[in-house]
Amino acid sequence: MSSQEPLNQCEDGVFDWCWSETHHGREVHVHSDKHTITFHQNRSNFSTAIRGTKILRKNMEHYFEIEMKSPFFGQARQVGLGTEHTPLESNNYDFTQLIGKDMASWGVNYDGSKYHHSVHTKYISIDPDKHEEIRISVLYDSYYGTLAFKFNGRSNGVAFDRVLTNLDLYPMLCSSGTNSVMRLTHCCSSVMSLKGLCRGIIRQNIHDDKHYDKLSVPSHIKAFLLYKTPKSKSSRRTDDERNNSPPTESTI
């Protein structure tokens, strides 16, 4: 990065990028703020997607947040990363998830599933019908190739740890739902911090997340290593209490 190039900080009102007015599929309406997208304003016959205006630079940490409102329906309402070759629309009457359909894209759906190379598994437990709003936060480490998400502030750690960092990746959205709206509420990029570099080195040497419980470090350090949200002091319990009780949404 050039020494004269400004470093974008994570500050309110500062956006590193917005949604592209040209690189999207059919039935995508980019609002004047270029942050809000409406998909399939009249009816939906397929899935469609949009890319951000900028490639997420390598060897940096990238963060962005997407807000989506109820009602939640349809097969696809996704957030993630993809390349210029990731498809921006499907065939008619094909409501597939486009982000994660190929080997060079990674994403999550509003129902908590994660997608890559046409394989999907559950990432986090969430019932969209119980929420008026779902806010998905994305943290992409383009130095070590890790991708983590939060759903309404709740994280289940790293979703993908082998993102191909040699690719030029863009932020992406995808939807198959009629009149579905998604809004970019925040985005920023920063150079890798010393903490982030140390976390990456530790994660390279501890390949199984279950081994982190054996580390003799405070719980908030374990949460940082796992890309999870640490509990507040008022809600923390001892390890013995946590190990002897069934997991709930607040402890995942």
Image: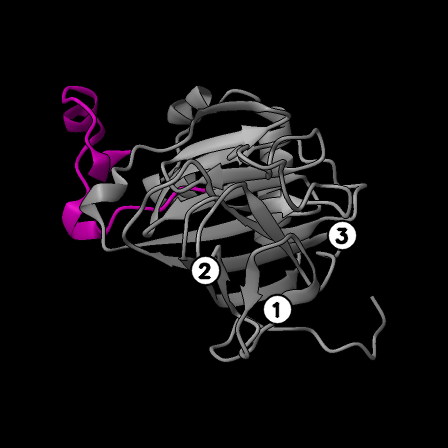
**Residue 185 x %, y %:** 45, 68
Work out which quarter of the rendered image holds the N terminus and state it: bottom right
SS at mark 3 in the image: loop
The scheme the figure's colours follow is one colour
Residue depth check, mark 3 versus mark 1: number of the one nearer the observer = 1
Q: Label for residue 41? A: 2
SS at mark 1 in the image: loop
User: Is 84 positioned to the left or the right of 25 in the image?
Assistant: right
Q: Nearer the viewer, residue 120 or 188?
A: 120
Identify the residue under disc 3.
58
Q: Earlier in the sequence, mark 1 or mark 2?
A: 1
Work out which quarter of the rendered image holds the C terminus and state it: top left
Are the residues at dot 3 and dot 2 in contact (C-beta closer than 8 Å)?
A: no
SS at mark 2 in the image: loop
Identify the residue under disc 1.
18
Amino acid type, residue under disc 1 in the picture: Cys
Amino acid type, residue under disc 3 in the picture: Lys
Q: Earlier in the sequence, mark 3 or mark 1?
A: 1
Q: Earlier in the sequence, mark 3 or mark 2?
A: 2
**Residue 206 x %, y %:** 56, 24
- Structural distance between the alpha carbons of marks 1 and 2: 20 Å
Residue depth check, mark 1 versus mark 2: number of the one nearer the observer = 2
Q: Residue 210 sits in which quadrant?
A: top left
Q: Residue at x 50, y 80 (%)?
A: 13
User: What are the residue bounds of the magenta stretch?
Assistant: 227-252
**Residue 23 x %, y %:** 71, 58
Q: Nearer the viewer, residue 65 or 86?
A: 86
- Structural distance between the alpha carbons of marks 3 and 1: 18 Å
Amino acid type, residue under disc 2 in the picture: Gln
